[in-house]
């Protein structure tokens, strides 16, 4: 391919093109395949460095979504086989049922500026999204995979770990991208766990997690003040802790207790 025909990287779209073929192939091998083809959506294929390995695998039924018109034109020209598999648009906006009707997995070297928003979409669709294999800023990858008791453990760690098992696959230095990002990158894999639904009110669970971490330095007793907890809940020893000290299970149990006390108050 002629150099002049390459896509010029746009900062606003978080474009850093990977040029190390060995790493690209390894990332695509991070997807766990089965005997029958799995549906896979690649987010932000750019010039197709991952796409070319994915599309040649008969065990992968691939679709891609790319927001950048220049990249879409490049992909159509260089990978004719992709033609009716390209969605030009914004992953954060697209109706994912128009891409796949049933379950699917996600892969991509994510645009780092929107990686958290991508994960909130994954959470919305968690009963359809079996796996996510992605490259992102190492700091964000570490945060997502962090266990309780760790300073970087936060809202996304709890919510994602509630429904996914998370593994780090590799670290990736800036020099293998054009242009190089300012930060280290990492590849992680999320695989849907067995938890089909929460044994507590899910909205309340999310509220407790978010509210707890909003003032993460405070004890939960203080951080959760706005939730107007009943006095028996306020007295619980677990409220002496800070949000970052609670495991997923602890958050579920706390939500159950709050839920019960509220039901009691309303005479249910
Ligand atoms: N996969 C390529 C490009 C990674 S850069 C590679 O590894 O080289 C991130 C890619 O995501 C870019 O191609 C960018 O255009 C695309 N992108 C950015 N925001 C997007 C969005 N909201 N929806 C879909 N694609 C997006």
Image (cartoon, rainbow, N blue to C red):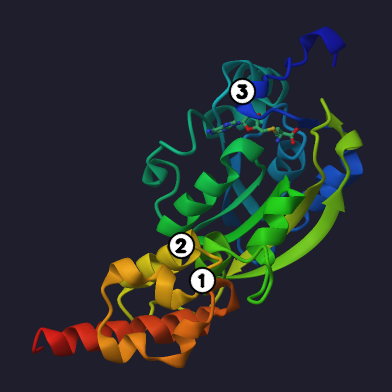
- Left or right of 181 on screen, residue 266: left
- Could you tell me residue 85's position as x and y percent? 55, 34
Furthest residue to the left? 267
Q: Residue at x 10, y 84 (%)?
A: 266
Taking depth in this image into account, of 83 and 93 the one nearest to the observer is 93
Q: Is residue 209 left or right of residue 1?
A: left
Q: Quadrant of the C terminus?
A: bottom left
Q: Is residue 134 above or below residue 168?
A: above
Residue with the mark numbered 2: 126
Residue at horizontal 43 percent and vertical 68 percent from the top: 223
Q: Which residue is mark 1?
A: 163
Where residue 105 sits, quadrant-wise, is bottom right
In the picture as drawn, the residue positioned furthest to the top comes out as 4
The answer to the question of whether label 1 and label 2 lie on touching residues, with beta carbons closer than 8 A, is yes
Rendering quarter of residue 242: bottom right
Residue name at image x 41 percent, y 36 percent = 93
Q: Earlier in the sequence, mark 3 or mark 1?
A: 3
SS assignment at label 1 = helix
Nearest to the eye among marks 3 and 1: give it: 3
Residue denoted by label 3: 12
Q: Position of residue 101 (x, y in %)?
A: 39, 51
Q: Position of residue 183 (x, y in %)?
A: 80, 40
Relative vertical location of residue 104 with respect to residue 224 in this rendering, above or below: above
Which residue is at the front of the view, 241 or 15? 241
Disc 3 element: helix
Q: How dense is the environment of label 1, judged by Cα within 10 Å: few (below 14), some, or many (20 and up)? A: many
């Amino acid at each position: 391919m002629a150099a002049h025909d390459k896509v010029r990287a746009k900062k606003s779209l978080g474009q850093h093109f990977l040029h190390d073929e060995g790493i690209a192939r390894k990332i695509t091998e991070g997807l766990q395949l089965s005997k029958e083809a799995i549906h896979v959506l690649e987010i932000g294929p750019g010039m197709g460095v991952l796409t070319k390995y994915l599309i040649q695998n008969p065990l992968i039924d691939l679709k891609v979504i790319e927001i950048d018109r220049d990249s879409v034109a490049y992909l159509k020209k260089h990978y004719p086989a992709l033609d009716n598999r390209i969605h030009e648009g914004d992953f954060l906006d697209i109706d994912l049922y128009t891409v796949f009707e049933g379950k699917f997995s996600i892969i991509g070297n994510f645009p780092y500026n929107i990686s958290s928003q991508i994960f909130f979409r994954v959470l919305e669709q968690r009963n359809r999204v079996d796996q996510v294999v992605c490259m992102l800023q190492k700091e964000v990858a570490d945060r997502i995979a962090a266990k309780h008791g760790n300073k970087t453990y936060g809202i996304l760690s709890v919510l994602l770990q509630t429904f996914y098992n998370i593994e780090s696959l590799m670290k990736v230095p800036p020099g293998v991208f054009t242009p190089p990002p300012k930060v280290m990158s990492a590849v992680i894999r999320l695989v849907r766990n067995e938890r089909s639904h929460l044994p507590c009110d899910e909205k309340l669970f999310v509220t407790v997690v978010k509210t707890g971490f909003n003032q993460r330095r405070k004890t939960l007793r203080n951080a959760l003040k706005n939730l107007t907890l009943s006095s028996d809940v306020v007295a619980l020893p677990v409220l002496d802790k800070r949000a970052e000290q609670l495991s997923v299970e602890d958050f579920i149990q706390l939500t159950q207790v709050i839920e019960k006390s509220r039901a009691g108050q309303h005479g249910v």
